[in-house]
Image (cartoon, grey):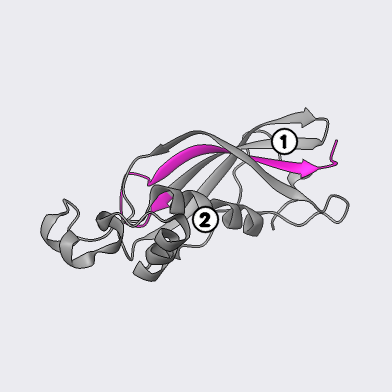
């Protein structure tokens, strides 16, 4: 069963999220939203001929933006503290490209917490795994603020 954030212990891993398939439509929508239309992301025909991956790859930040939803699926809503805010990302690294139609999922472990005047800040070491590959797509420390929590 998923826990509330305040019930987590340092070093505890959250339940692993579901696999998410990254489609060309997802990549194209992200390209449109960010105005990043580099051919390695949006031109399958050119990638087949010129890319070392022989296919399009997702933007690294597309992977990053999918992490919060995975977090929300791994914890219970807290009826006392209703506002959960993305607070930032530390030490993010893109290790392995996510190719079109790859499946990724997030594995997060609570590193530490810190009391802020606005609430409790949670630091999650997070890895984006790629199904069938040894190297992860991304590693980073994601910060989440539970507003009002002490």
Residue that carries the numbered disc 1 in the rendered image: 121
Q: Residue at x 30, y 58 (%)?
A: 41
Q: Position of residue 16 (x, y in %)?
A: 54, 54
Quarter the N terminus occupies: bottom right
Q: Is residue 36 left or right of residue 75?
A: left
Q: Residues within 10 Å of mark 2 (few under 14, many from 20)?
A: some
Q: Secondary structure at mark 1?
A: strand
Residue 148, by quadrant, is: top right
Report the residue at 59% width, 52% height from top: 68
Judging by the rendered image, the residue that carries numbered circle 2 is 66
- Say if mark 2 contacts mark 1, CB within 8 Å: no
Q: Would you call the spot at circle 1 few (<14 residues within 10 Å), some (14-19), or many (20 or more)?
A: many
Residue 22 visible within the image: no
Span of residues in magenta: 129-150
- 52 lies above or below 123: below
Q: Position of residue 13 (x, y in %)?
A: 59, 43
Residue 138 painted magenta: yes
Q: Residue at x 49, y 48 (%)?
A: 64
User: Where residue 100 sits: x, y (%)?
Assistant: 31, 63
């Amino acid at each position: 069963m998923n826990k509330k954030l305040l019930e987590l212990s340092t070093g505890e891993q959250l339940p692993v999220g579901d696999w998410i398939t990254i489609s060309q439509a997802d990549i194209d929508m992200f390209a449109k939203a960010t105005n990043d239309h580099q051919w390695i992301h949006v031109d399958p025909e050119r990638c087949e001929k010129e890319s070392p991956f022989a296919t399009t790859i997702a933007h690294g930040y597309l992977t990053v933006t999918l992490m919060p939803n995975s977090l929300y699926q791994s914890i219970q809503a807290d009826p006392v503290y209703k506002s959960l805010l993305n607070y930032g990302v530390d030490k993010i690294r893109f290790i392995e490209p996510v190719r079109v139609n790859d499946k990724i999922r997030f594995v997060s472990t609570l590193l530490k917490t810190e009391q802020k005047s606005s609430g409790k800040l949670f630091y999650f070491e997070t890895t984006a795994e790629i199904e069938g590959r040894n190297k992860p797509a991304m590693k980073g420390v994601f910060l989440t603020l539970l507003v009002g929590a002490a």
